Image (cartoon, rainbow, N blue to C red):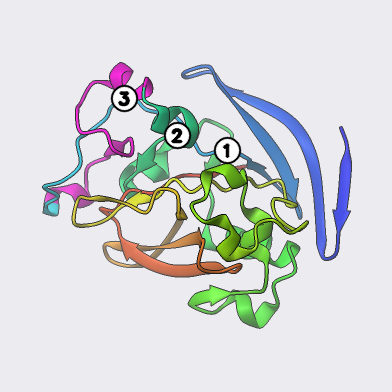
Amino acid sequence: MFLLFLPFMRMSAQGTYTDTRDNSTYKIVEIGNKVWMAENLRYLPAVSPSGNLGQDDYNQAKYFVYGYDGNRVEEAKATQEYKIYGALYNMVAAKNACPAGWHLAKDSEWKSLEKALGMSGSQIKDIGNRGDNQGQRMAGDTSLWVSYAQVKFKSGAFGSSGFMALPAGFMGANGKFLNMGTKACFWTATEYCDGYSYFRSISINSLAVYRNNDDNRCAMSVRCVKD
């Protein structure tokens, strides 16, 4: 184990965790006082094609792989998109996707993470882009970000948190895959109002972390936090 200290942050490498449901192994990292998976969840018990979302999709667990429009799990798992970025989950699936002993991070746990990375208490509560370079610190692998120089990913702060956010994009409520290479999007377990929940995103257009809410039928990446 090694320890890396940065201003306002306590981060410690924690090794790996293996999900016995599918034998996927994940890097994990402690930031502040929480242990996070440092990779997007890959659990994929089923897969659906994109498009044609309806009212029933608010109540049914749906799993997607970016760019894949079939329904064969092994075929979806063979794609480069899945191997690099993991799966995308609608809200019903996201809330139940983490393995035993872990859970989908709540909005408050994301706030604690952001505070540990130096975001101020007043900024944490805002909607929209918040903070200074917390998004840059949380990002990972410059080679995957389109035009990464736009967000100054070459600086020493890039990836310093160990969180390793990757630009997996998302699937919008219009049923279309969007923004791979330019944006990382993560659900939180916290409801904003009926049918909408809070999320976080990091994009090439800002060094900050974006907070807002979106339609629960959208599909985003999942980061699990240890109970």
Front residue of 41 and 176: 176
Left or right of 19, for residue 68: left
Mark 3 to mark 1: distance in Å?
18 Å
**Residue found 56% across the figure and 64% down from its top:** 150
Label 1–label 2 contact, CB within 8 A: yes
The magenta-colored residue range is 56-78
Q: Amino acid at mark 1?
A: Glu
**Residue highlighted by disc 1:** 39
Residue 96 found in image quarter = top left
> Residue 203 at x, y = what percent?
50, 61
> Residue 145 at x, y = what percent?
52, 50
> Residue 97 at x, y = what percent?
42, 36
Q: Secondary structure at mark 2?
A: loop
**Residue found 31% across the figure and 25% down from its top:** 76
Decide which of tag 2 and tag 3 comes sooner along the chain: 3
**Residue found 40% across the figure and 33% down from its top:** 81
Q: Tell me the crowding category of disc 3: few under 14, some 14 to 19, or many 20 or more residues within 10 angstroms, Cα based.
A: many
Decide which of tag 1 and tag 2 comes sooner along the chain: 1
Front residue of 219 and 140: 140
**Residue highlighted by disc 3:** 76
